[in-house]
Amino acid sequence: MKAAYLTNTGGPDVIQFGDLDAPTAKVGQVLIDVKAAALNPIDTYVRSGLVAFDLPQPFIPGCDAAGEIAAIGEGVKGFDVGDQVWCSNQGLLGRQGTMAERIVVDSQWCYRMPDQIDHATAAANALVGITAHLGLFREGRLKSGETVFVIGGTGGVGAMVIQMAKAIGARVITTAGSDEKAERAKQLGADHVIQYTRESIADTVKHLAPAGVNLHWETRRMPNFDEAIDLLAPRGRMIVMAGRDSRPEFPVGPFYVKECSLHGFVMFKAAADEMQSCADDMNRWMSSGKLRGNIAKTFSLDQVSEAHRLQENEGVGGKIVIDCQS
């Protein structure tokens, strides 16, 4: 089979394209003919060695995929050959990734794909959608009628945060750095978009939510905790999901006096039943059109190195999808 793979960590050029032996489904696994995979920042961290895991040799990168089940291993229940499925949580913790024509996945990380959506959308929404769901509902306990402020509403996770918050009846304020991104955030459902290049984030949020925001989702590598806690409502919650090396100052007094809470988490440490709960909601919202893919660019399987370079150096204001059958 054709695959993108690497034998040592490093820059995007360590990714090779060629033939590898096709895997076979073992106990508890399904074999998937991959139609689409998606690229996430964590893929670049693993490839570069910034996030160190013991990698199979050769290692296929990628966390997300969507495709058709080609074979089922012993003990698998709930799936049949021919089922259209999507999966996530691959390419981590010693597991092979998804950027290949065929992959095997433990069935606990695999979810049936609704008929109403395409493979590219399912793959693009997988990791970022599960991340957003965990942060909003498991960690942030978001409820209908509350106000969410998310930095960067057109990014991979930000786009999911906007749509999921709106799906349950929350109000969403977000930021954008250009007219194009602001319009995209509005299309995703944001109630208010702050163009931070020409207006103050703090002043505008205070005007839009004078009583404070209930949930502040931070996507920047260096959070501004003074500003964030000032913008939170009493008992507000703040989510952080980036900034491995950042060490910002933290205003302890204002934080505890307001009875706020700070939540940090990583998606791949969630339990299988937690991810299944996320997938169930995502499938329902994707089927109804409430959760759409935020796809910015598509590459072929032999262009994964180029896709990594774009993700790492520039970003594209959305998701990069890999067409694994072109």
Image (cartoon, rainbow, N blue to C red):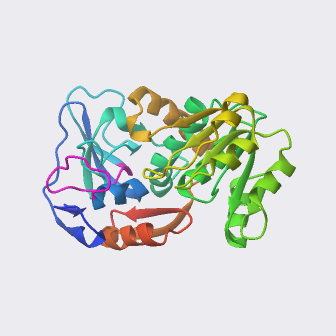
Residue 217 percent location from the top left of the image: 62, 45
Residue 48: name its quadrant. Answer: bottom left
At x 57%, y 47%, the residue is 249
Q: Position of residue 115 (x, y in %)?
A: 51, 45
Main secondary-structure element of the magenta-colored stretch:
loop
Q: What residue is rendered at 79% in x and 34% in y?
A: 145
* Magenta span of residues: 49-67
* Closer to the camera in the image, 23 or 187: 187
| In the displayed structure image, the side of residue 118 where residue 159 appears, left or right | right
Above or below for 120 versus 113: below
Relative side of 93 to 298, left or right: left
Whether the magenta-drawn stretch holds residue 43 is answered as no
- 201 left or right of 21 in image: right
For the residue pair 153 and 98, the one nearer the viewer reads as 153
**Looking at the picture, does residue 313 appear above or below residue 262?**
below
Q: How many marks?
A: 0
Q: Is residue 150 visible?
A: yes
Q: Residue at x 73, y 72 (%)?
A: 179
Instruction: Look at the image and tell me whether residue 40 can be seen.
Output: no
Residue 124, compared with residue 17, is above or below; it is above
Report if residue 62 lies within the magenta region: yes
Counting from the top left corner in percent of width and height, residue 155 is at: 57, 58
**Position of 84 relative to 38 (above/below):** above
Name the residue at 48% across, 52% down.
246
Q: Quadrant of the N terminus?
A: bottom left
Residue 326: image quadrant is bottom left
Q: Residue 216 or 268: which is nearer the viewer?
A: 216
Q: Position of residue 304 (x, y in %)?
A: 33, 68
